[in-house]
Image: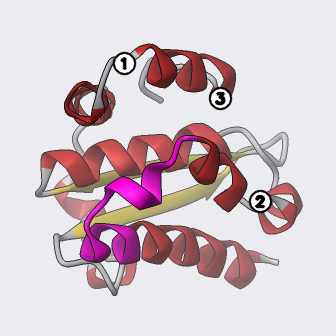
Amino acid sequence: MANLPDKDKLLRNFSRCGNWEEKYLYIIELGGQLPPLSAEMRTPDNRIAGCQSQVWIVLSTQADGSVQLYGDSDAAIVKGLIAMVFILYQGLTLAEIVAYDVRPFFDALALTQHLTPSRSQGLEAMVRGIRAQVAARQ
């Protein structure tokens, strides 16, 4: 997995941004830290429906029960949003992902209030897509 910050550091870094332009740039920077997704992983099954941009998310379960996430998008800001979602879910087990509500974290960042409606819907679609992949494995 990319060298992404943990949840607390993400929150600190986000709060240090002086305005929303800086926050958008930080989100894009996070997306730039995700490794590219291989062509083999860019399948219709891994594509997230409900996003205006093309988004692929792949979930794999590790031997210790934790989840590893891989993803990509054709839009820089969306790739950054993928990275933010991954920061919240990375390393959790399937059961922990089901139990974890990411909305309060995004509310703390005031993220959904500053995204366009289509980006907010796409963010929700990513979360639903991950949860659907988790449900299929339980």
- Does residue 69 appear left or right of residue 51 in this picture? right
Please give the label number shown on residue 97: 2
Residue highlighted by disc 1: 17
What percent of the width, then of the height, locates residue 129?
A: 51, 76
Disc 3 marks a residue whose amino acid type is: Lys
Disc 1 marks a residue whose amino acid type is: Cys
- Residue 29 on the magenta span: no
- Does residue 61 appear left or right of residue 60 in this picture? right
Q: Quadrant of residue 136?
A: bottom right
The part of the chain drawn in magenta is 109-122
Disc 2 marks a residue whose amino acid type is: Ile
Residue drawn at point x = 58 percent, y = 26 percent: 11
**Does residue 46 show up?**
yes
Residue highlighted by disc 3: 7
- Residue 115 on the magenta span: yes
Q: Residues within 10 Å of mark 3 (few under 14, many from 20)?
A: some
Q: CA distance from mark 1 to mark 3?
A: 16 Å
Is 52 located above or below residue 85 in the figure?
below
What percent of the width, then of the height, locates residue 5?
A: 53, 19
